[in-house]
Image (cartoon, helix red, strand yellow):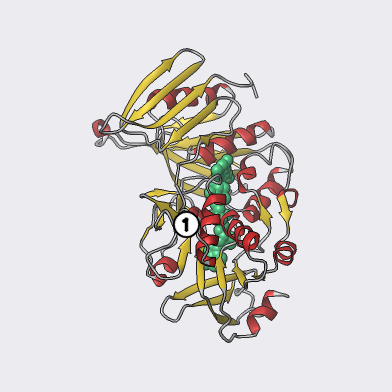
């Protein structure tokens, strides 16, 4: 069914389970429900086409010469048919009314006048799996700057990069920025990685650890500009992008005027973190924080609004955003059991192991690592650094293990 046809039948109440978002989180919930109940009505509403893909591949695919189509494991319509669900693709949820238990829909293609219809559908149980959005500070205009948080946008970038070696500036050296920097370098591009901090992963790990990552990244040929902020991106008369950046002012030089420097590149990728849109959580009346996401009760994944659950990048547990793939299966199984009224022992949240996909250095962390705090060295050699983060009771709350390059020069 085309989105136009689906939305034109402005609906009566069609109750059942409604899931918003067809990323890994939404599809995991469908798999978990269908493992227990083949027939209960499920409607999946998603602003994209619903295709199933493994998002972590987006920071590995370009050097493997894979395009977006290569990464799709099943199209949305095939996956919907296989799972016996009703897929409303290219459809955006614009409002939730938790009292009448309804959601408002509009075509995500509504800029085209053909798609002006909207609809309201009812739910018995609602699962919020609508992910998080990349942050675009004012200095990074969205019409000039890429992100790699969705396969569609990734696919457009991949096509541009497939035409030959180019210079790419990546703004933000968290995990995604650091991984895609290496992937693009391996694909033969020139890469400049810019971050406010002196080293990559500085919001997660202590300076002793991040200094090793900075060294590895630089020695493989990535131009790492640490301690700089991008102030502007504009297109010049030759069609290239001009990136203006300046040193982050320290307390001692706050009176000194900073002179911006410039870089001319072919593309800019923003990887400056994620935020959760407040519109739907506010409408649904669920407890919510823009930075970390929707608050859930960990053992049930229920929000504080009746019959509404949350999972994936839009959700947080104990004040920490849940933005990794590994816990999704267990979280989805709990939601399925809870929705279907089956006995379950409760979801037992354990922060997943975090592993940077870069080959120039091996970085692994367990627990909930954060830059500040009482980090203690356990092992320190040229090849290996192991540090523990101790909490107020001197208990280990996180451990990071950094090892020398797996492959010396990628
Ligand atoms: C480049 C990259 C590499 C990563 N690598 C790793 C890794 O190695 N290991 C790891 O554990 N994690 C990794 N992650 C994180 C992991 O991929 C995510 O945590 C996970 O994919 C999030 O899935 P999601 O379904 O919650 O969100 P998303 O994939 O963002 O899906 C959200 C869905 O909601 C839909 N939607 C949003 N708003 C609406 C609306 N209003 N109405 C209808 N539909 C809506 C969107 O269209 C989309 O289908 C990586 C992330 C990125 C970006």
Q: Out of 374 and 133, give the one closest to the viewer.
A: 374
Q: Quadrant of residue 389?
A: top left
**Residue toward you, 132 or 379:** 379
**Residue 132's spot in the image, x, y percent?**
49, 56
The number of numbered discs placed on residues in the rendered structure image is: 1
Residue 97 shown left or right of residue 178 in the figure: left
Q: Which residue is mark 1?
A: 314
Residue drawn 44% across and 46% down? 349
Left or right for 164, reference 142: right
41 horizontally vs 247: left or right: right
Furthest residue toward front: 343
User: Which residue occupies the foreground of this view, 196 or 47?
Assistant: 47
Quick check: 3 above or below 212?
below
Q: Which quadrant of the structure image shows residue 62?
A: top right
Q: Is residue 142 visible?
A: no
Rendered view: 145 above or below 404: below
As drawn, 249 above or below 214: below
- What residue lies at 61% left-to-right and 70% top-to-bottom? 42
Outermost residue to the top: 381
Quadrant in which the N terminus appears:
bottom right
Relative image position of residue 118 (x, y in whole percent): 57, 81
Quarter of the picture containing the C terminus is top right
Q: Residue drawn 54% across and 29% down?
A: 223
Pointer 1: residues within 10 angstroms few (<14), some, or many (20+)?
Answer: many
User: x and y percent of residue 402 in the render?
Assistant: 49, 24
Q: At numbered mark 1, what does the secondary structure look like: helix, strand or loop? A: helix
x and y percent of residue 176 in the render?
Answer: 54, 41
Q: Under 8 Å from ligand 1: the CB of mark 1? A: yes
Can residue 329 be seen by looking at this rendering?
Answer: yes
């Amino acid at each position: 069914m085309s989105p136009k046809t689906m939305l034109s039948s402005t609906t009566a109440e069609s109750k059942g389970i409604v899931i918003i978002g067809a990323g890994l989180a939404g599809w995991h919930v469908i798999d978990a429900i269908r493992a227990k109940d083949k027939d209960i009505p499920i409607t999946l509403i998603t602003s994209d086409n619903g295709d199933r893909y493994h998002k972590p591949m987006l920071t590995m695919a370009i050097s493997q010469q894979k395009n977006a189509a290569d990464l799709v494991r099943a199209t949305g319509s095939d996956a919907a048919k296989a799972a016996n669900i009703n897929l409303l693709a290219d459809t955006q949820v614009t409002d939730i009314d938790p009292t009448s238990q309804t959601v408002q829909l509009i075509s995500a293609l509504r800029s085209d006048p053909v798609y002006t219809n909207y609809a309201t559908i009812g739910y018995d149980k609602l699962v919020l799996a609508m992910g998080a959005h990349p942050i675009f500070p004012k200095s990074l205009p969205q019409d000039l700057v890429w992100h790699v948080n969705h396969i569609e946008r990734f696919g457009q970038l991949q096509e541009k990069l497939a035409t030959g070696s180019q210079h790419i500036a990546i703004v933000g050296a968290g995990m995604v920025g650091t991984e895609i920097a290496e992937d693009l370098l391996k694909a033969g591009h020139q890469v400049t990685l810019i971050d406010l901090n002196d080293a990559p992963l500085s919001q997660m790990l202590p300076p002793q650890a991040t200094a090793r990552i900075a060294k590895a990244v630089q020695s493989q040929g990535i131009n790492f500009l640490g301690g700089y902020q991008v102030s502007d991106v504009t297109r010049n008369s030759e069609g290239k992008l001009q990136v203006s950046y300046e040193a982050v002012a320290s307390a001692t030089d706050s009176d000194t005027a900073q002179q911006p420097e410039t870089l001319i590149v072919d593309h800019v990728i923003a990887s400056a973190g994620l935020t959760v849109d407040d519109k739907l959580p506010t409408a649904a009346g669920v407890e919510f924080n823009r930075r970390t996401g929707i608050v859930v009760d960990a053992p049930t994944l229920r929000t504080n609004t009746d019959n509404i659950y949350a999972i994936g990048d839009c959700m947080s547990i104990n004040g920490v955003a849940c933005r990794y793939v590994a816990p999704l299966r267990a979280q989805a199984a709990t939601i399925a059991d809870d929705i279907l009224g089956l006995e379950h022992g409760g979801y037992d949240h354990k922060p997943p192991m975090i592993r940077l996909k870069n080959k120039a250095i091996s970085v692994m962390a367990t627990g909930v690592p954060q830059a500040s705090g009482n980090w203690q060295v356990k092992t320190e050699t040229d090849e290996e650094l192991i540090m523990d983060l101790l909490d107020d009771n001197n208990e280990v709350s996180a451990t990071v293990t950094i090892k020398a390059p797996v492959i010396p020069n990628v």
